Image (cartoon, rainbow, N blue to C red):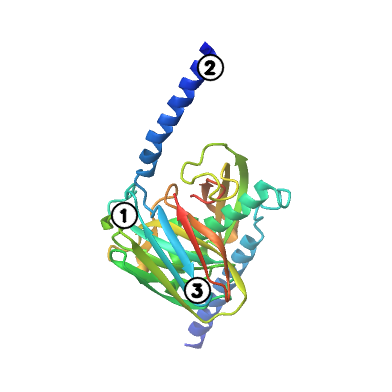
Amino acid sequence: MVASARRWVGLLLATTVLLVLGWAMTATVDEGRQQFAAGSPEWEVAGTARWNTLSLGRRVLLPGALFFLLPEVGVSEVRHEPGHCTEYPPGSFPHLDYVAETRVYTFFRVPVRTFTVRCGGNYL
Amino acid sequence: MTRIQKTCAFAALTLMVGALVALPAAAQTPKQYPQYGTLNYNGAHLVQTDFYWRAIGNWHTSDPALELDMNLYNVDYFDSCTISSNMPSWYDDCGFAGVMDSGYEGFGAGSYKPETAKTYQYYYADWNFSGGSGLSADFKLSWQEMKHTFCWFDATGCMGGACSSGCGGVLKSGRLNWGTSQSVTWNY
């Protein structure tokens, strides 16, 4: 009985350590904003795209309560594509001509899905 | 009038007529999200939205759902909320707000039958918040087409995003300031 309990406790501890380690590794993912000059359109779009992928993109993969399995989003690219955005009229949001590529990560920095976020990072 | 002037005048006239014809056509393009709406904040715990569709459609599934989320980028500003709405088969998704979200909280109001909404009819979704502290919070009011991902029946835990492209976006962004009421509109 005692040996069985010890085995379960050990298993629980090992799982916890593994999850914490996996999460910690994912926490080191570069958010991707630092590659751009602070205040530049690319920098602003990267921030917007990242937040919108966190709130909208992750739902494509998992429902709300399981978001913790997808803890991080990184921006891999921001590019200028004039005229691509047909969803919003000009001036609705800043930098509508920019497109961002974002990537959702799960534990151990494993990439799960890449999203193309259009219209200045406002439309997935 | 020279020939060049006549050609330019004709081209300008053609462009103007074309724009007049094209604009209403673009405005009638069916969308999953309400193309027009207002968001009113009373400076305290109440956010009210009123909105309508000019044309509704473009769903990616045969049984879509729609969720409108108030995403707040100050997780201390409000603690929880309840929803009231007249959207078809509306639901309250405040229960999932802040569940393992980092740096923001998403408070959701949804509809299990958005495809049955009528065009040019005003619908509302109101967020009655409670708790919290802080002077201001950046917000994004976003929409997302959802579908029954994990189970077939209507329950908020069953719903996931319907697709990875063309299924979500921001309707309005701005900042809520405690003690200051505001009204903003979107028109797409």
Between A106 and A92, the residue placed more toward the observer is A92
3D distance between C-alphas at marks 2 and 1: 43 Å
Tag 3, which chain? B
Q: Nearer the viewer, mark 2 or mark 3?
A: 2
* Disc nearer the start of the sequence (2/1): 2
Q: Dot 1 lies on which element?
A: loop
Instruction: Return the residue found at the far front.
Output: B1
Q: Identify residue type, mark 2.
A: Gln
* Disc nearer the start of the sequence (3/1): 3
Give the side of residue B85 with respect to residue B97, left or right.
Answer: left
Between B11 and B97, the residue placed more toward the observer is B11
The label on residue B42 is 3
Q: Are marks 2 and 3 on the same chain?
A: yes
What residue is pinned by disc 2?
A: B5
Residue at position x 62%, y 55% in the image: A47
Q: Are marks 3 and 1 on the same chain?
A: yes
User: How many residues crowd around disc 2 within 10 Å: few (fewer than 14), some, or many (20 or more)?
Assistant: few
3D distance between C-alphas at marks 2 and 3: 56 Å
Q: Identify residue type, mark 3.
A: Asn
Residue at position x 51%, y 71% in the image: B98
What residue is pinned by disc 1?
A: B120
- Residue B181: image x %, image y %? 53, 71
- Residue B177: image x %, image y %? 59, 71
